[in-house]
Amino acid sequence: MITSRGINGPNVMTAEWVMQISYQPMLIGAFIHEGSKTLKNIEKTKEFGINVASQKQTTAVNIAGGYSGIELDKLKIKSIFKFVKPQKIKTPLISGCTINAECKLVRKQKLGDHIMIVGKVVDIRHDDSKNPLIYHRGRYFGLGSTIEQDRVEVNVSEDMLEYFKNIAHEKFVVKCVGVIVESKNKILVISKSKTALNMIPFSIPPPGANQRDHLIEFLKHTGLEIQVSDIPIMKRLILKNGKNIQRINFVLFQGKNQKSTKVMKWTHSINDNLISTLI
């Protein structure tokens, strides 16, 4: 629900096409009909409120979307809308929502048969106790059960899990790139520094880096001369030890050993749950 204010007081409308379009600064875009009272209000005041409805607000959403501000002063309907005092703007916000965002207008552009308005969020609040309302094909829905991602669970040692948690730096998912080199039913591994853990050669590339190119440079830096294939394999894992977990994405390439400036170390994959899952 988009709130605005004008010469005749505040107004509210529902909008399906609303989305966050930037993190820094936080920007929210909304698409509304040209000529609407909401658009006129926003053009005048250069501000608006974004109120993400909760599951108990079907009536409010229906009224806000079913009547225009020209037809009816919707916010005066008894017992339907309650307000939250804004912090940074003068436009009122709707109480009972999952999210209330206060926005300053930064851009307006006509796209097709709608007008896009973009607001910079100057204040935002979120109520974790409320679930958002979903609208689809003329009906309202709530959030259902959680859909688990397609990840393979791997039980690992406490030391192995702690190692990956440390390199994750509290990130939700650690993105790694590594190489699988097999010879005589054994797998090439390297010892991770400051630990007694053995793992396939892998690294964590910086954001935006080509995964294969980064891997090749990493292998050269570690003294391993390995011919790397150009076909990536994706392994999406959840490492577990008791109740503790860490999510890992492994982009893997098959490799062929050429020669190395360091002593090669090989292991049977059957001896390690993680390595056997990766190959």
Image (cartoon, rainbow, N blue to C red):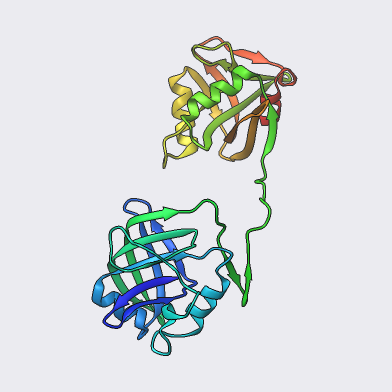
Asked whether, in this view, residue 273 is left or right of residue 99, the answer is right
Say which residue appears at 33% left-offset and 55% top-offset.
123
Say which residue appears at 38% left-offset and 89% top-offset.
70
Image quadrant where one finds the C terminus: top right
Percent of width and height locating residue 30: 40, 70
Image quadrant where one finds the N terminus: bottom left
Query: Based on the displayed image, in which of its 4 quarters is residue 110 positioned?
Result: bottom left
Percent of width and height locating residue 5: 31, 75
Residue that extends furthest to the front in the rendered view of this protein: 78
Between 130 and 85, the residue placed more toward the observer is 85
Q: How many marks?
A: 0
Percent of width and height locating residue 46: 26, 70
- Residue 123 can be seen in this image: yes
Percent of width and height locating residue 227: 55, 28
Asked whether, in this view, residue 70 is left or right of residue 193, the answer is left
Q: Is residue 108 above or below residue 74?
A: above
Between 93 and 275, the residue placed more toward the observer is 93
Q: Is residue 195 above or below residue 115?
A: above
- Residue 279 can be seen in this image: no
Say which residue appears at 28% left-offset and 59% top-offset.
88
Query: Based on the displayed image, in which of its 4 quarters is residue 92 positioned?
Result: bottom left
Say which residue appears at 65% left-offset and 14% top-offset.
266
